[in-house]
Amino acid sequence: MEQTLSTHSSPTSWRRAGQVAALWLGLRSPVHFARLLILPAQVLLLGIVVFPLITEVYISLTSWTPTRGANWWEAYKYWDWGKNYVILMQDGYFWRALGRTALIVAVAVPLEFLLGLGLAFLFLENFRFKGLFHTLLLTPMMVVPAVAGYMFFMLFQSTGPVNAILSALTGLNVQIPWLIHGRWAIVTVIIAEVWQWTPLMFLILLSGLLGIPEDQLRAATILGANFWQKFRYLMWPMLRPVAVIALVIRGMEAVKIFDTIFLMTGGGPARATESISIYMYKVAFKDIRWSYAAAAAIVILVVMTVIASYALRPLQAPAGEETT
Amino acid sequence: MNRSRWWTALIRYVLLVVVTVVAIFPTYWMATMAFKPKTEWTGAGGVIYWYPHNPTLENFRTLLAQNQVGKFFRANTASALPSIRNSLIVATLGTLFAFGVGVLAAYGLSRHDTSAQGHFPFYLPLVRLALLVIILMPFMLLGSRLAIVDKWYGIGGLILIGIMVDDRIGRLMARVYTRGPVGNLPFSILQLRMFPPIAIMIPIMVMWAAFAMVDTLHGLVLIYGVVTFAFVVWLMKSFFDEIPRELDEAAIVDGSSYWGAFFKVVLPLSKGGLAATALFVFILNWSDFLVALLLTNEKWTTIPVFLNRLVSAETGAQYGPKAALGLIALIPVLVFGIAIQRYLVRGLTFGAIKK
Amino acid sequence: MASIRLHNLRKTFGNVVAVHSLSLSIADGEFAALLGPSGCGKTTTMNMIAGLETPTAGDIFFGDKRVNDVPPDRRGVGFVFQNYAIFTHMTVAENIGFGLRVQRRPPDEIRREVHKVAELLDITHLLTTRAGKLSINDMQKVAIGRSMIMKPRIFLLDEPFSNLDASFRFYMRGELKRLQREIGQTMIYVTHDQVEAMSMADKIAVMDFGVLQQFGTPDEIYNTPANLFVANFIGSPSMNFVRCRYCQENGQGYLVQQEGPARLVLDARRRHLLAQRHRADDLVLGIRPEFIHASPTMSAAEPETAWPGRVVFLEPLGARTIVHVRVGADTLQVAAPADYRPALDAPQWLTLDPRFLHVFDAQSGLAIR
């Protein structure tokens, strides 16, 4: 592929320079052209991902914090051999935030999956106003997450419309302290998360279901398979790769939950809805313990990396191609 | 048979109507709230106003007018207008920046970097990122010891070393993992999406503060560009992959330059994809809360941050103006989002699922 | 009983009429082909027989039982789809055994039955292969086997051979015919390939635009087409058509070409038939290329009826040569012997075999018999 520069017997230096320039502008060889295309991205990622990460590791090993007056590159003056990590391991708030985040993901994502799957089945056949319903159902995922947080803040006031609707439906005087009581607050967070992201699950799973050849389902019908058998023997095996992608991606995103909680409860009451992101935010900006927040971030990154290296594995094989 | 069809249709519609009502009720509630006068905001008096009985534009007036807001909000006397303007500018420029970088990389990955084709092991870049961090660490420490990491030559030198190291690692890994990926792009772009953004934002804040880029336009645009350019790369790559390679090869054979083939053949053919990706990325930038929360304080406040301030500033519930601002924030995303419905799945799954 | 009777069957999709008041009966054990160009409603008809589509109007009877409201799996039909609809993620054995598996039959029995079917189709060596990896030809067999294992009373095949390569298609035609004879099921077969229909079916139903054009044995369809569509659709190369009018001179009946010099003496029966019609000036004369004789000189016997023309095109097909001859404004195809090679533009004299003439009304397209 790579074209080598043809060195003439008496190349003038101008010509040579021109050839080099042409190479670097990607005019000569596809390899150099590709290199040039990718260069800006590489610079950007190095500058804004890799070096900050290194900075983060660096700071986390010190007790530096901006209020100490030194610039961050002088943090070596506060070097303390990773004491932050030792403290972090014993920090109950950190572990509880981690557990709480895991709980939110573990409840919300499967719920979204089941609801999305159910909805997708409703959309398999044609019916009137299908397009309208489809569009309306998608709106939650388009709502700005911070605004969604505010919406749920309004809805779940003790004297708000949700309690009023529940009262009307049950005939009782429902007064659930949604955002005030710890247990209820986390339920509210999960409801908001499910409300906002079920549409995405629905969309992904619907596109998966529509990818199943209709004739195979018809063939199974004629052979006497009932709905459950068709689902188990045909739809599920073919849907599985898509379902895995949906679960992994949603899981990945749900771990990061911040905006909604921040506007809805601010992590409270007390620390009842403090997700891992909220925890880090508080450490860095409320407690001004930057190096400690950096250490927490590094631990999270490592944990997520380990999880991701397993969780993302199914994404390697393109959807539809199974490895048995 | 006809009778059972009738029943299933009825059940379907009942379910759909219930789910749809749940899906749009929060938005509806906020929209009505924006037009309710103060007396109808809460159900504290035991009465819930399901729709505005006396619709008014007062909330919008309060929100946008500079002086009147002060009466309601002690901590925030500013009008919301600058934040709306800021959101528009930042989201647009961030999108353009992400595009400039991302589209080129996407084309490179789609056409030229054969090793990135086909089975791309998503977990490998993590190894690569870790290696990069470990190898570049001493250089960085050296740089900070010499106090040159805030100078242009310090940064430039580090990035140059970074590129060389990255290329070496890429080539090495391509040899180790034969199924492998790893052209020149550090695929950390994907796990960027996996890590809680705040984990990356902590050092970014440190560096931004050092470079005096907090609360500046270029500081915001730069970080928005990075956060969303992963989407541009994956989305545009999936669109470019759909255009047959033979087209640009034919253009090159016919005497067009590589750039010519890209600009005159491939880009015009992917107009739809470009538009969809642009709108998608705009929505992401527009919706961002965390980055703006951390990197702005006064001048470049965006809508979500302003909204948050309204919430935290006032203990008494100022529902109306906040709802009005929320409604303003929703309008562009709803319009654009519905326009690119078809591509939402592709965007949010990084092009893994095409419909 | 597994005879099938369709009575005024009709299916519309919105404003589009897919099947137009179709009535047919197919006897028990008969092999019937639904033949027609694509989009003529044959697949819709099949789907209605299988129960995959509900008819808009009309009835379907299996034997004496009306099956309109019987769900597809209770109708006892086997269906082979055009694209085979093989379950690609299962093995061949799982595919074939699927019908029994969903009936929760014991695994032993399933294995036995699968083996029996596989042997019949000669695919025992493929049983553990993933079906997605099969060749098209083998997929075809699996699709047939998967339906066969259910021992359906009625076997429906939707263009089963259209994707196969030519030699295997030829082989499968024979196989299918043999299977049908051995098992003795009623079989309905959808195809757009007239050779397939002619060579395999006991009865052929020719359809166009959702309307049944003719239903009969292959011989009937070929020799006495009911209308212009059937006449044109069946036979390769297709029938020649010449627009004519009828006239009488000297007690003889003639067909006279509308745009050209040709004329043809009619026999007494046809003369009688045409003379009775009050409108006989817009007719179509049809004759298959096989029944025209071309020669470079006028045959002395019947100078009146030999048609003068010129060669415009030669199509040597190996076994014979198709000579395109222009007579007046019409071009006729003549099936000549293989070694017949007149020069282009050479004059030709065509003699038509009067026994194989077809006369159609040009307005209605119906045959006049």
Image (cartoon, helix red, strand yellow):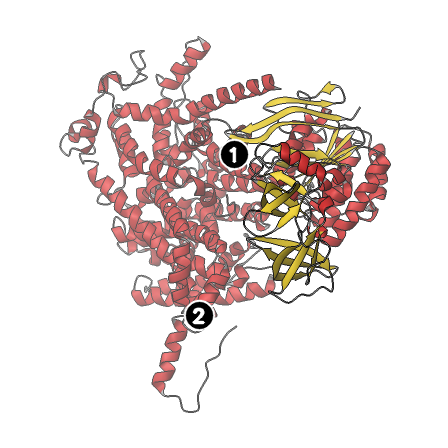
- Asked which quadrant contains residue A196, the reply is top left
Please tell me whether residue A61 is drawn above or below residue B151 in the rendered image.
Answer: above
Element at label 2: loop
Task: Specify few, some or many for label 2: CA neighbours under 10 Å numbering under 14, 14-19, or 20 or more.
Answer: few
Can residue C307 be seen in this snapshot?
Answer: yes
Q: Residue at x 41, y 74 (%)?
A: A23
Place of residue B230 in the rendered image (x, y in percent of width and height, measured from the top left): 43, 51
| Circle 2: residue type | Asp
Circles 1, 2 touching at the beta carbon (< 8 Å): no
| Residue B226 shown left or right of residue A67 in the figure | right
Mark 1 vs mark 2, CA separation in Å = 52 Å
Q: Please give the residue where the numbered disc 2 appears in the rendered image.
A: B254
Element at label 1: helix
Q: Residue at x 53, y 19 (%)?
A: B11
Q: Chain of mark 2?
A: B
Q: Please give the residue where the numbered disc 1 appears in the rendered image.
A: A109
Question: A43 and B18: which one is in front?
Answer: B18
| Circle 1: residue type | Val
Place of residue A30 in the rendered image (x, y in percent of width and height, measured from the top left): 47, 69
Place of residue B244 in the rendered image (x, y in percent of width and height, measured from the top left): 50, 58
